[in-house]
Image (cartoon, grey):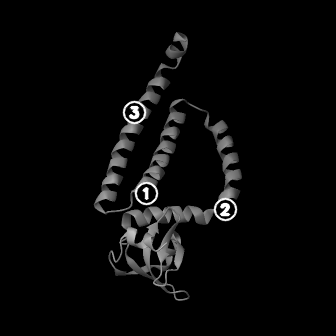
Amino acid sequence: MADFFRTYQTELLGTLICLIVFYLIRFIIVKGIKRIGRKSQLSIIRTRLVVRYVAMLLGLINLSFIIVIWGVPLEKLGVVISSTFAVIGVALFATWSILSNITAGIILFFYYPFKIGDRIRILDKDFPDEATILDIKAFNVILVKDNGEMLTYPNNLLLQKGAGLLGKQVATREELEMDF
């Protein structure tokens, strides 16, 4: 066992440093995202979702650094990664819209002026709708029309088509959910 530690001392130290830096950066970024969510009065669920996405991305970056530190031969790693991506690529092609909805959900979290309870108009020439936002999820926005009808609108379409803000906080989440 002592021989293992002597042989791989540099790699083990590099891995330990990577893990410490990873957790430190993750802590700082997560705190920042939560602060943005609090200041913007965004849903805790949405904030947790964005934190989860960022943590996964940071984890993949950290894993890449650890692979380089341990000196995994890039030729062998390249074959494994390309084979994996070939198989996953077929599955992702079918679910590409899901990925775009997740990305749009993150953009909506940070940069969009709408919050739960706001009244909006969807700017779609074929299906114009006015509704109040009940919830903003990872894949879609749940809207409630005046007649009580619930609409599920994909996040990526909300960014593509656009929406106009008709009124800020016309209803609270509790008031909207009481009808259902």
Residue 174 percent location from the top left of the image: 39, 68
Numbered disc in front, either 2 or 1: 1
On-image quarter of the N terminus: top right
Residue picked out by circle 2: 93
- Along the viewing direction, whichever of 7 and 173 lies nearer the viewer: 173
- Along the viewing direction, whichever of 156 and 45 lies nearer the viewer: 45
Instruction: Name above or below for residue 137 compared with residue 180.
Output: above
Question: Three-letter amino acid code at disc 2?
Answer: Phe
Residue contact between numbered discs 2 and 1, judged by CB atoms under 8 Å: no
Residue picked out by circle 1: 45
SS for callout 2 = helix
Residue furthest toward the top? 2
Q: Which residue is at 68% across, 63% downward?
A: 94
SS for callout 3 = helix
- Along the viewing direction, whichever of 92 and 143 lies nearer the viewer: 143
Q: Which of marks 3 and 1 is nearer the N terminus?
A: 3
Q: In which quarter of the image is residue 98?
A: bottom right
Total numbered circles? 3
Q: Left or right of 111: which side holds 124?
A: right
Residue furthest toward the left? 39
SS for callout 1 = helix
